Image (tube, helix red, strand yellow):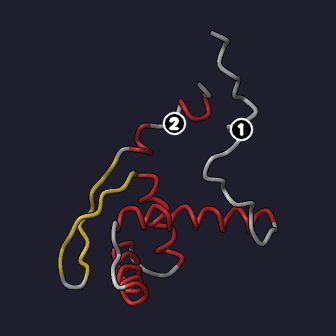
Amino acid sequence: MCQLYALTDPGAYRSQARSIRLSGHVTSVRLEQRFWQIVERIAAESSMSPARFISTLHDEVLRERGEVGNLASLLRVVCLNYVQRQLESRAGRETLPAIPDEPAMPVRSPDCHPPPPR
């Protein structure tokens, strides 16, 4: 197993529920801590609290699509989109290559080694 991923801090993927008011109703959203950190960064860059950012996003999606579906999943994808835009910006590229649904080969970092033969 690749140490880069295997040594991930458990605190980063520990899930946490937060209460948020959406359309006048209190609900809770459960995300992993790393996603909450990204939501907080996106909100701060928009001069909003995380709760206000999520409420605004929720309302905009309702207007555009009529329903939100799974809010936690939406937030995770929003976070990934944010990170991708950050990477694209740093790379000086308009877009990065699309992430394939089923890559032909696994992506490995330089410190990863293939598993030993069986």
Secondary structure of the residue carrying tag 1 is loop
Q: Which residue is painted at 49% across and 63% down in the image?
A: 77
Q: Name the side, left or right, on which 36 lies relative to 104.
A: left
Position of residue 66 relative to residue 75, above or below, is below
Report crowding for label 1: few under 14, some 14 to 19, many 20 or more residues within 10 A (C-alpha): few
Q: Amino acid at mark 1?
A: Met
Above or below for 72 versus 20: above
Q: Which residue is mark 1?
A: 105
Q: Which class describes the residues within 10 Å of circle 2: few (<14), some (14-19), or many (20+)?
A: few
Asked whether, in this view, residue 116 is left or right of residue 23, the answer is: right
State which quadrant residue 70 falls in.
Answer: bottom left
Residue appearing at x 40%, y 62% in the figure: 73
Q: Is residue 77 above or below residue 13?
A: below
The single residue placed furthest to the bottom in the displayed view is: 63
Separation of residues labelled 2 and 1 (CA atoms): 22 Å
Q: Quadrant of residue 4?
A: top right
Judged from the image, the secondary structure of the residue bearing numbered disc 2 is loop
Q: How many marks?
A: 2
Nearest the viewer among 56 and 60 is: 60
Residue 101, image x, y percentages: 61, 52
Q: Residue at x 43, y 80 (%)?
A: 48
The residue identified by callout 2 is: 8
Mark sitting earlier along the chain (2/1): 2
Looking at the picture, tell me which residue is in the foreground, 30 or 77. Answer: 77
Q: Quadrant of the C terminus?
A: top right
Horizontal side of residue 31 vs 20, given as left or right: right
User: What is the number of the mark on residue 55?
Assistant: none
The mark lying in front, picked from 2 and 1, is: 1
Residue 111 screen position, x and y as percent: 72, 29
